[in-house]
Amino acid sequence: MMNKAIFYHAGCAICVEAEQQVLWALDKNRYEVEVVHLMENQPAIALAEQAGVKSVPALLLDGAVFHINFGASLEEVKGRCHA
Amino acid sequence: MMNKAIFYHAGCAICVEAEQQVLWALDKNRYEVEVVHLMENQPAIALAEQAGVKSVPALLLDGAVFHINFGASLEEVKGRCHA
């Protein structure tokens, strides 16, 4: 069975760097990778929050949250989406 | 040529979780992985600092720093090592 990786981002420069490097480094033979852009997929914000995501970029590996550097808080992402 | 990943940690619970999950998820066919325990290898603290590491756990991918969650600042690690 494949492991599951979900990368949450908001399109910021720090998000893009993490996506290009950390996500690229994952073993795609073991991980099914999903990339979720929270500014373009607002319903996913609630799912990210439920998973424990506090800021982006964040990587979920089989449900465990790893915040990678700091681009923006989830609150900031929500604020911009609702504006 | 292999890519180079260096994982800096200080033995804390958050470090161990990141090591077990993020490091495990890397593609070992493309990345040569080195794990550096800063409490047991104090000379490496200066190297980590030069590389831009501000806190542990941190993952260097070909020189780019990715701080993963937050276990302790590098200043805290230094303080404990000198104590």
Image (tube, coloured by chain):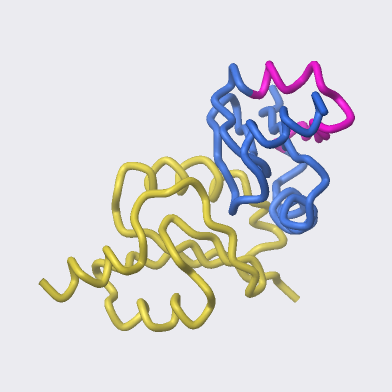
Chain colours: A blue, B yellow
* Residue range of the region highlighted in magenta in the rendering: A30-48
Q: Does the stretch in magenta take in A41? A: yes
Residue drawn at the location 59% of the way across and 17% of the way down: A50
Quadrant the N terminus of chain B occupies: bottom right
Q: Residue drawn 70% across and 71% down?
A: B2
- Looking at the image, the residue that sits furthest to the front is A83
In which quadrant of the rendered view does residue A21 lie? Answer: bottom right
Examine the image and state in which quarter residue A49 appears.
top right
Spot occupied by residue A42 in the image (x, y as percentages of width and height)? 82, 22
Is residue B7 rendered to the left or right of residue B27? left
On the image, the x and y values in percent for residue A18 come to: 71, 54
Residue B65 painted magenta:
no
Q: Position of residue A10 (x, y in %)?
A: 78, 40
- Which of these two is toward me, B14 or A28? B14
Give the residue at the far left of this rendering.
B83
Q: Residue at x 55, y 33 (%)?
A: A65
**Location of residue B61 by image quarter:** bottom right
Count numbered badges in the picture. Answer: 0
> Residue B18 or B71: which is nearer the viewer?
B71
Q: Is residue A81 above or below residue B73?
A: above
Q: Residue at x 54, y 25 (%)?
A: A52
Residue B23 lies left or right of residue A75; in this view the side is left
Across and down, in percent, residue B5 comes to 59, 66
In which quadrant will I find the C terminus of chain B?
Answer: bottom left
